[in-house]
Image: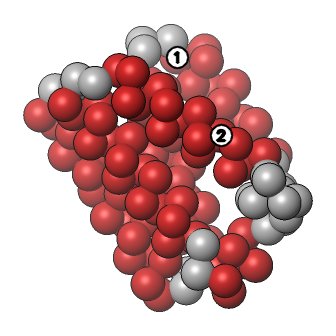
Amino acid sequence: MTHLEKKQHGQEVQALRAAVERGDLLAYVNADLRFHVELLALAGNAHLVEIARDLRYRARLYGLKKMSERGTLADSAREHVAILDALVRGDADAARTIMDHHIQHIRGIWADRPE
């Protein structure tokens, strides 16, 4: 991960945190999309990035408003920080573990289903 890539991802994490603090769900979703798409782009597979972007545009995040109301949206933002920190350290195992946990949240809490 280059210095510029670290900076860009850091900016998206800050945008996520700021959106949580303001309770701005649209800004959160947009920053989350940018974070994940830019992270995927590091793999160098433009086709995968476009598929992921398209799927995100089509997806419905039913539990997002409830997460914001319960304060758990901030937990999701912290997961993004942890993922980025692990990548910056070059700790692929930690990044994978944190991402697995994050994906479980997407399948559970974000879909408004208990995990």
Residue at (42% x, 12% y) in the render: 44
Residue at (39% x, 21% y) in the render: 93
The answer to whether residue 110 is visible is yes
Name the residue beneath numbered marker 2: 103
Front of the two marks 2 and 1 = 2
Q: Tally the numbered discs.
A: 2
Res 90 quadrant in image? top left
The answer to whether the residue labelled 2 contacts the one labelled 1, judged by CB atoms less than 8 Å apart, is no
The correct choice, above or below, for 22 with respect to 15 in the image is below
The answer to whether residue 61 is visible is no
Instruction: From the top left corner, tell me how far across and down residue 8 is, in percent.
Output: 26, 45
Q: Amino acid at mark 1?
A: Ala
Q: Residues within 10 Å of mark 2 (few under 14, many from 20)?
A: few
Name the residue beneath numbered marker 1: 46
The residue closer to the viewer here, 66 or 53, is 66
- Image quadrant where one finds the N terminus: top left
The correct choice, above or below, for 96 with respect to 34 in the image is above
Instruction: From the top left corner, tell me how far across and down residue 78 is, in percent.
Output: 42, 60
State the CA–CA distance, disc 2 to disc 1. 21 Å
Residue at (76% x, 36% y) in the render: 55
The correct choice, above or below, for 35 with respect to 96 in the image is below
Left or right for 5, reference 35 = left
